[in-house]
Image (cartoon, rainbow, N blue to C red):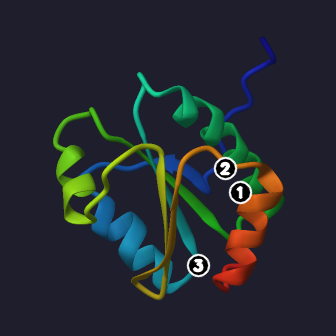
Amino acid sequence: MHAHHPQPDFIFDVDLEDFDARVIEASKIKPVIVDFWADWCPPCRALTPVLERVARAFEGRLLLAKVEVDEGANMKLAGRYGLKGFPTVLLFIGGEIKGRFSGARAEHWVRDFLEEHGAS
């Protein structure tokens, strides 16, 4: 088990209550990747650290918002965006969804995805 690094301020948890402010509004200033994940989902547990590494590499030029779908009313957010499986990642830029993908991916794949969708 490696030491748990404190979470930088560009990586944070969001829920139904603060999603619009911390994701949609924030994406008008910087790209935001939203990680919809669940505790019971092994691919989610594989993807989250990959997204965190990518976010750290961007050094704050990109925000990573994590939504635990089983927490509170968060499944409503998954419903709002028509998500079928987890993990699903949405990329918000300028207040709109500019890209999405599902399933665990390698770090280089995620970087390419961000570049292709104008997040870098």
Residue 40: percent from the left, percent from the top?
A: 41, 22
Q: Amino acid at mark 2?
A: Leu
Q: Is residue 18 left or right of residue 87?
A: left
User: From mark 3 to mark 2, how far is it between C-alphas?
Assistant: 16 Å
Label 2 belongs to which residue?
51
Residue 56: percent from the left, percent from the top?
A: 77, 53
Mark closest to the chain's N terminus, 3 or 2: 3
Label for residue 55? Answer: 1
Q: Comparing marks 1 and 2, which lies closer to the viewer? A: 2
Q: Does the image show residue 61?
A: no
Q: Is disc 3 placed on a helix, strand or loop?
A: loop
> CB under 8 Å between callouts 1 and 2?
yes
> CB under 8 Å between callouts 3 and 1?
no
Residue 84: percent from the left, percent from the top?
A: 31, 51
Label 3 belongs to which residue?
30
Q: Is residue 64 left or right of residue 114?
A: left
Q: Is disc 1 placed on a helix, strand or loop?
A: helix
Q: Residues within 10 Å of mark 1 (few under 14, many from 20)?
A: many
Q: Comparing marks 3 and 2, which lies closer to the viewer? A: 2
Q: Is residue 41 left or right of residue 116?
A: left
Q: Quadrant of the C terminus?
A: bottom right
